[in-house]
Image (cartoon, helix red, strand yellow):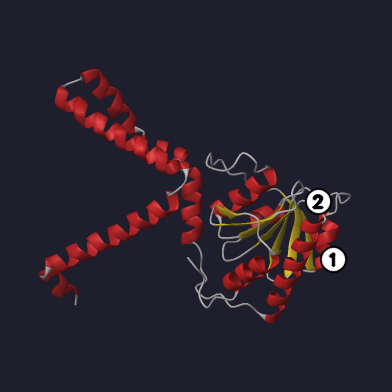
Amino acid sequence: MIELLKEHRWILDLLDIALMSIVLYRLLLIVKGTKAAQMLIGLGILLLASLASRYLELFTIDWLVQSFWAQIVIAIIVLFQPEIRRALAHMGEAQFLNFASAEELKSLEEIVRASISLANRKIGALIVIERDTSLKDFVEIGTNLDARVSKELLLSIFHPSSPIHDGAVIIKGNRIAAAGCFLPITLSSDLSKSLGTRHRAGIGLTEETDAVAIIISEETGFISFALGGKIEERIDMGTLRDMLTDIFTAKKSKK
């Protein structure tokens, strides 16, 4: 088979182009809507400047640009750190099937009921539900609970008198893994200025992992839903239930 492919080199060339196209397409999807997209445009301008300086024999500019290209690998790692971490996290996802057990479905209903109750009382909250990407690093810096998910427990955790109400709750399966967890805050400049730290933390985590974040605003009582670095605001009870059900009962995880 391999010898046959070598004899028909054009097949390997087409395969090479197809695979490269897929890789580039996935990378563009990752950086779409982020600062990395603007940085890529900047790198494109530098490439054009390099070509123009050589053609016009602008030696000083050419020297400066070439000096930058010599450090391009380090520059890409520094500039695109959030996107690289997110890409590696998606690549490391081992599960291809995502089935929800009866207990997990019950937990989702408890989360929905707790979210509505918190919203009605205008109690701020950040509830994170783990999917394929492990949130172990964030669980370790919080207060370990390992308790069954229930509306009453979530309400008590986020009550203003609770010492761990400011952080996020991380749920794994049908268990509350930890509370009072601190999450990375998004640096996106495209978000509304009205979104506070709690919303930005929820979005920040979903930029780096495939987790789901439910955010309740203490100012307005509105429920927001973050996934994949995107946020949907003013979610009602039915919509929240449908969104969670679609994600956690799908036959296959949406990659």
Q: Amino acid at mark 2?
A: His
Left or right: 191 as drawn, with respect to 194: left
Question: Which residue is situated farthest in the bottom direction here?
Answer: 102
Instruction: Using the image, tell me which numbered label, if any, was put on residue 74.
Output: none
Relative to 46, is 37 above or below?
below
Above or below for 135 versus 80: below
Spatial CA distance of label 1 from label 2 is: 14 Å
Mark 1 residue element: helix
Residue carrying label 2: 165
Residue farthest to the left, as pictured: 7
Residue 224, position as x, y percentages in the image: 65, 55
- Label 1 with label 2: CB-CB less than 8 Å: no
When asked about the image quadrant of residue 10, the answer is bottom left
N-terminal of the two: label 1 or label 2?
Answer: 1
Q: Residue lying furthest right in this view?
A: 161
Residue at 51% of width from left, 57% of height from top? 89
Find disc 1 in the rendering and name its residue.
152
Q: Quadrant of the N terminus?
A: bottom left
In the rendering, at what x and y percent does residue 162 appear?
87, 51
Q: Amino acid at mark 1?
A: Glu
- For the residue carrying disc 1, how many other residues have a C-alpha within 10 Å: few (<14), some (14-19), or many (20+)? few
Camera-nearest residue between 197 and 70: 197
> Dot 2 surroundings within 10 Å: few (below 14), some, or many (20 or more)?
many
- Element type at mark 2: loop
User: Closest to the observer: 203 or 67?
Assistant: 203
Q: Position of residue 111 (x, y in %)?
A: 73, 66
Q: Is residue 98 left or right of residue 87?
A: right
In this view of the protein, which residue sits in the foreground, 231 or 141? 231
Name the spot of residue 174 as percent of width and height, x first. 72, 71
Taking the spot 83% from the left edge, 57% from the top edge, the residue there is 157
